[in-house]
Image (cartoon, rainbow, N blue to C red):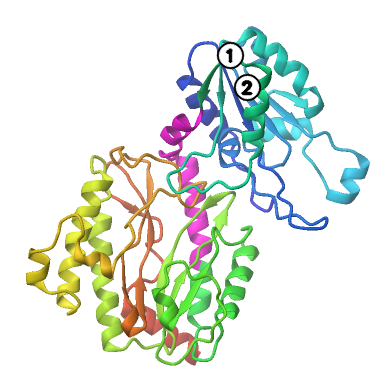
């Protein structure tokens, strides 16, 4: 892996918290992700299961983690299974983890080769009372491909039909929503890499540059700083495309007078950042562009202040909506009388601000966490209001990543330029340097 060694105490602590949530005499199973095929003999770059990584730190395919706190044999409370390497694999695919390396990464003492899994798993199944199986449960998830965990679930339930089965997903939603100090540091590191990429663009963006050229600049900076690359498919949207929420073609030329909406961020060690900024392609916001930009920025600052323990996503979004209504009225986009008479279930501001303001961030960009849970210290949320005016080819979204603490929200992107005047100044300094 490109990233520097992570303190294994992170994974040791995560397993302890997870084990404490299990029922008596329960065995939990986590599988690595598949290496996804393309066509012919091609395959996509491997991306580890976030849950398995969270609990073990193992970033390799063909891996299985077992957690069995009440195991009769004390050495089997935690077990890792890895694919055994060979000279042939080493020649064609490169180095794979040794047992010693896996112990050092994870803090798990008992490591077996994958070929030993079936025999040992059968032994443990004869002892345990229930089994926790892992599934991808997320309100935004659209699962069209059968995962390794899903295949294992089917085979396990066929072979052991009268065992009691439980879901690991609710426990992972509860645990992963709260970030430890180690995790906050990794997310901060991803944010710092993102900042380097954004600052690189301030002297690069100008009329005539292509969106894909901007993407290339970011890739260079991210990878140079030990990132695997983008945390998500980058949105580099100029002109009318700035009003398309998930525009990912990145194939247009940036023209004089355009706004360039950049929803781009780096990952680091599987942890993600999530940034949105808007630049005037020619280095100077028009009055209208700046007015809309500053309206969004005011909403963002007020929304950030509401990301505090005890609040909840429903009340939070309602309050952000009220702030947005005020700004849209000032911009002449909404009528104050119409807003007073609106259907509360269909607020008028949704015409110009149609998405949510915040989501959990961590090992997944849209990380695990219940929308019915009150905000708690240790949660990390994005804060990303926006105003989109298609008839003006003008879309503005501004986004930072916020760590909730007992004292006050901590902006993990506080050093990334955000004020319109500062952005203009930096763009023109670099242009004329």
Q: In this image, 110 relative to 85: left or right?
A: left
Kindly indicate whether the residue at mark 1 contacts the one at mark 2 (C-beta within 8 angstroms): yes
- Along the line of sight, which residue is nearer the eye, 333 or 26? 333
Q: For mark 2, does the 10 Å Cα neighbourhood hold few (<14), some (14 to 19), or many (20 or more) residues?
A: some
Q: Which residue is depicted at the point 64% across and 63% down? A: 223
The magenta stretch is 168-195
- Residue 151, image x and y in percent? 66, 33
Res 210 → quadrant: bottom right
Residue named by callout 2 = 157
Residue drawn at 32 percent across, 78 percent down: 420
Secondary structure, mark 2, is helix
Report which residue position mark 1 lands on: 163
Q: Is 258 rendered above or below residue 27?
A: below
Q: Is residue 188 magenta?
A: yes
Which numbered disc covers residue 252?
A: none
| Rendering coords of residue 54 (x, y %) | 56, 37
In the displayed structure, would residue 299 be above or below residue 85? Answer: below
User: Marks 2 and 1, Cα distance to the nearest angstrom?
Assistant: 8 Å
């Amino acid at each position: 892996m490109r990233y520097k060694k992570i303190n294994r105490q992170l994974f040791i602590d995560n397993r302890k918290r997870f084990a404490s949530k299990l029922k008596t005499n329960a065995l939990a199973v986590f599988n690595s992700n598949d290496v996804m095929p393309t066509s012919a003999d091609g395959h996509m770059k491997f991306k580890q299961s976030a849950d398995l990584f969270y609990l073990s730190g193992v970033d390799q395919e063909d891996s299985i983690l077992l957690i069995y706190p009440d195991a009769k044999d004390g050495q089997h409370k935690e077990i890792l299974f890895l694919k055994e390497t060979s000279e042939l694999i080493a020649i064609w695919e490169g180095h794979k983890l040794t047992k010693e390396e896996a112990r050092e990464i994870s803090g798990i003492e008992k490591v077996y080769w994958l070929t030993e899994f079936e025999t040992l798993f059968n032994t443990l199944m004869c002892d345990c009372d229930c089994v926790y199986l892992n599934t991808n449960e997320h309100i935004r998830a659209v699962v069209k491909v059968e995962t390794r965990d899903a295949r294992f679930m089917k085979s396990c339930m066929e072979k052991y039909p009268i065992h009691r089965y439980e879901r690991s997903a609710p426990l992972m939603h509860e645990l992963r929503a709260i970030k430890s100090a180690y995790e906050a540091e990794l997310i901060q590191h991803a944010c710092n890499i993102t900042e380097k990429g954004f600052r690189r663009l301030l002297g690069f963006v100008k009329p005539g540059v292509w969106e894909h050229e901007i993407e290339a600049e970011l890739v260079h900076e991210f990878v140079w700083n030990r990132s695997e690359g983008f945390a998500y498919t980058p949105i580099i949207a100029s002109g009318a495309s700035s009003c398309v929420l998930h525009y990912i073609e990145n194939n247009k030329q940036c023209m004089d007078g355009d706004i360039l909406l950049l929803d781009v961020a780096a990952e680091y060690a599987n942890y993600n950042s999530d940034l949105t900024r808007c630049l005037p392609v020619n280095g100077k916001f028009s009055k209208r562009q700046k007015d809309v930009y500053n309206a969004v920025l005011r909403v963002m600052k007020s929304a950030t202040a509401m990301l505090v323990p005890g609040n909840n996503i429903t009340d939070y979004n309602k309050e952000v909506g009220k702030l947005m209504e005020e700004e849209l009225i000032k911009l002449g986009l909404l009528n104050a009388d119409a807003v007073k008479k609106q259907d509360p279930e269909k607020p008028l501001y949704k015409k110009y601000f149609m998405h949510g303001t915040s989501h959990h961030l961590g090992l997944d960009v849209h990380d695990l966490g219940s929308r019915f849970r009150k905000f708690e210290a240790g949660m990390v949320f994005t804060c990303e209001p926006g105003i989109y005016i298609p008839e003006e080819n003008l879309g503005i979204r501004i986004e930072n990543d916020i760590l909730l603490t007992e004292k006050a929200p901590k902006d993990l992107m506080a050093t990334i330029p955000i004020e319109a005047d500062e952005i203009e100044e930096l763009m023109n300094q670099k242009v004329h340097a």
